[in-house]
Structures are given as structure tokens and as C-alpha cells.
Image (spheres, rainbow, N blue to C red):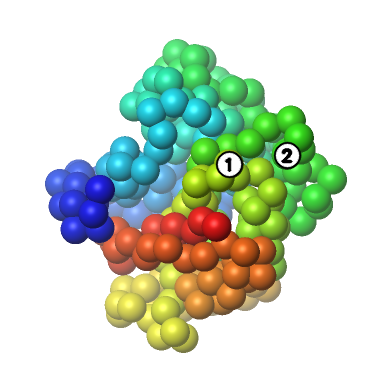
Amino acid sequence: MTEEAIKDLVKEAPIVDEPRPPCDPYPLSPYVAWAGRRNRDPILGVFKTLFPKDGSVLELASGSGAHVNYFAPHFPEVSFHPSDYDTKVFETIKQTRDTQNNKNVDDPILIDLTKPDTWVNAQARLYDAIFVINLFQVAPLSIAEGIAELASKVLKPGGFLAIYGPFKVDGRYTTASNQNFDEEILSKNVPEWGLKDVRDLEKIAAGHKLVLKKQLDLPANNFILLFSR
């Protein structure tokens, strides 16, 4: 499908318009739940053009599991694999899966992107796609090293890595609203919080032989960055 066709699908997808709770990056917070609902349908529209008809998809930094459990029913022949470094969220992921009867969502697994010994063994499983949503505004850029290295090891030939979120581009904000959002995050004075630059992620990925193939505009001034070999 062409990039223009993908843009048309994104435009047609509904955007959840709800009052925004106070910014709180804890995976089970009302803010994270709101952020997850806000753009899940535009993201799903893109994934419908990209995911295989059947296969295996890994989500990194799944948090509450809201995204993986929302997407799974739309791809009944795809096996979804949630993961996180925080095992406290695992029960929430499983409860949501069971409530929604998502039989194609596996039990979550521990993946700490800073600790390669926790990563999936490429000898045991390879993935058609890997995705991560709303991570980098509250995670250090160094996490991108782990994501890119892991993806380079466990993606199938022809597989892709999708990273969604708000980013700067070439050192600049793409909109005033993204600048305001970044200033709000930075005001919390937490080290490594803040919008990252697409070019920095691109450079890190290139070190692991992954190329930024597409940068897709989504509503609310966010992007999906698509990397592959």
C-alpha cells in the first residue's frame, strides 16, 4: 500500500477526544490510559496495512497492555507477545486479555531493554514485526540502543520495527503543541525526560543495520517511524 493510501486510512480513523488527566508516566495511571486511547485507532489503521496476515508480533514496553489487547482482535491469525521490564503490570495485561477473550495474546514476558540477558533468544523465536508506543518522551535515548539491537537480532527477513510517539525533527519542534508538551515534561526535572529527535533514533538504528524507511504523520502531531534492514 502506498504512503498516500496509508495517510487516507489515518485520516478516516477516529481520534478519542477526552479531557487530559495530569501528566503521569506510570503505566497504570489515568494519563497513560488516556494517551493510549487517544490515537489507538490511527495506529491500528497503519498496522492493518503493515502486519502480516499471520505470524508473530512483539510489543516492547507494553505497560498496561492496552494497545496489544486493543489490536489483537483485528488480527486473529497473528500471535501477539507483550513484554515489559516491570513485572508488576503483567497481571493487568493478562486480566485484560482474559476479559476480552484475546486468545492470540500470549502471557507477557520480561524484557529489560538495558539488559541483553533478558532478551528473547533469536534461536527460539523470530518476529514479523516489533512495535513500541509512547515510550521515548519518558525514557532515555539510550533505550533506543536496546530496541535497535534486539530488533536486529529477532526480526524475520522482511520484518519491521515501528516506533510511535511525538518527536523533534532535525533539532526542531514540528508544532507549537509539541513544544508545549516538551516544556511540560521537562518542567518535571526528571533526567532523560523530553522529546527525542528522529535523527538520533535513525543514527542509533543505523548502527545495528536498521534503516528508517518511512516517517508517517499521525494525528495529534505524532509519528510512526518504520525501520527495517
Q: Mark 2 points at which residue?
A: 122
Nearest the eye: 108 or 66? 108
Image x and y of residue 215, in percent: 37, 65
- Name the amino acid, label 1: Lys
- Disc 2 + disc 1, Cβ < 8 Å: no
Name the residue at 38% across, 63% down. Answer: 214
Image x and y of residue 77, in percent: 43, 20
Name the residue at 51% across, 52% down. Answer: 161
Query: In terms of secondary structure, where does tag 1 sit?
Result: strand
Mark closer to the chain start, 2 or 1: 2
Q: Residue furthest bottom?
A: 171
Quadrant (top left/top right/bottom left/bottom right) for the C terminus:
bottom right
Q: Residue furthest front?
A: 157
Left-right relation of 64 to 217: right
Q: Name the residue under label 1.
A: 156
Residue 198 makes an appearance in the image: yes
Image x and y of residue 168, in percent: 43, 77
Nearest the eye: 91 or 213? 213
Crowding at label 1, few (<14), some or many (≥20) Cα neighbours within 10 Å? some
Crowding at label 2, few (<14), some or many (≥20) Cα neighbours within 10 Å? some
Left-right relation of 80 to 14: right
Name the residue at 49% across, 15% down. Answer: 103
